[in-house]
Amino acid sequence: MTEVADPLVTDTSGRSRPTGSHRRSREELREMLVSAGVDILLEEGLGSGAGHLTFKRVFEWLEQHTGVRVTNASVIGRIWDNQAEYQTDVLVAIASTDGSEVLESVFRALQPLLARFDRTTVEGRWAALREMARVGGAAHVDLLANSTRWQRWVGVWALVMSGGGSDGGPAGPVADALRRGSDAVTQRFERAYERMLSSFGFRLRAPLTLRQLTTATGALAEGCALRYGVDPASTRRIRRPTGPGGAEQEWTLFSVGVEALVRAFVEIDPDWDPAGPASQRRGDHGPREWS
């Protein structure tokens, strides 16, 4: 990558810096400005879009938070032709996600339970699936409901659906990023669900597909998280006699829905071998094992 000597990008923080550290490539400067724009929108929200994300506002934020001073001359015509192009790139950055944050949260909640699940009986396998729905479902929707980044992602989605935004409507790069991100999330969860089902001896009920299961549970999670934000009553835990010996356990509304969906989509695999290699794939080593 060609380095560009840019005397218009300077450090005013007073920190000691190596000679020539003001030399930034166009790509480095672009990444810095897009990252700053994302941080501003995470702090301040989208409103009706990214129209309030002006170069002046971003330059001021950068100088205040990092000590780096940037000018219009170092950006306009060199990285973006205009402010609208910059705003679109920031929205694209928010729209792009691979679902790793949610998957890791779910795995952290399930990890203490994975080794204890009983896979030797049909009843134990159904109980394990129920417990994964209860614990993993709660972790999933709670993370979404409390994630500023996810809330901004929803805001970008709504902006595109309403035909607004810097890209001029749903056919633009922001919508493309949303589709790519959504597909990446779905694929990660498909792989996690496939690993879970093969580990506990379940298969899909024909003619249903793994993509349909993942899409249905994902849509339910997003809907519940949105409802949690405006309806505090929906966050109340539901007590059900699902624990050992009929002991009561706390469930989220989303977890109840997940259990119902999973039971509708899967059935016991009569050919599954508890001692076979597929049954050993529990994902015990981390979320990457699930994806």
Image (cartoon, grey):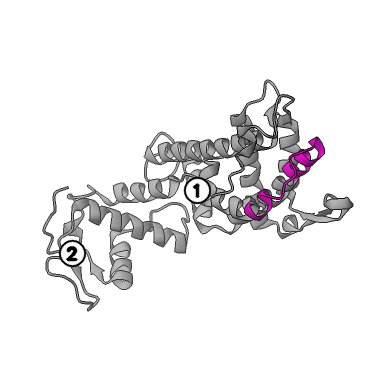
Mark 1 neighbour class, 10 Å CA radius: few under 14, some 14 to 19, many 20 or more: some
- In the rendered picture of this protein, how many numbered marks are placed on residues? 2
Residue projecting furthest to the front: 275
- The residue at which mark 2 appears reads as 9
Q: Quadrant of residue 177?
A: top left
Q: Quadrant of residue 269?
A: top right
Residue type at mark 1? Ser
Q: Does the magenta stretch include residue 118?
A: yes
Residue at (20, 63) in percent of width and height: 71
Residue at (72, 36) in percent of width and height: 261
- The residue at which mark 1 appears reads as 100
Mark 2 neighbour class, 10 Å CA radius: few under 14, some 14 to 19, many 20 or more: some
| Residue nearer the viewer, 230 or 194 | 194
The stretch in magenta equals: 111-130
Residue 187 coordinates in the image, percent (x, y):
52, 36
Q: Is residue 36 magenta?
A: no
Q: Looking at the image, is mark 1 or mark 2 nearer the viewer?
A: 1
Residue 202 coordinates in the image, percent (x, y):
70, 31
Residue at (47, 47) in percent of width and height: 156
Does 64 sit left or right of 159 as displayed? left
Q: Which of the labelled discs sits on residue 23, or is there none? A: none
Assign a secondary structure to mark 1: helix
Residue at (38, 37) in percent of width and height: 172
| Residue nearer the viewer, 121 or 219 | 121
Residue projecting furthest to the right: 245
Residue 151 coordinates in the image, percent (x, y):
53, 54
In the picture shown, does residue 63 fall above or below 148? below
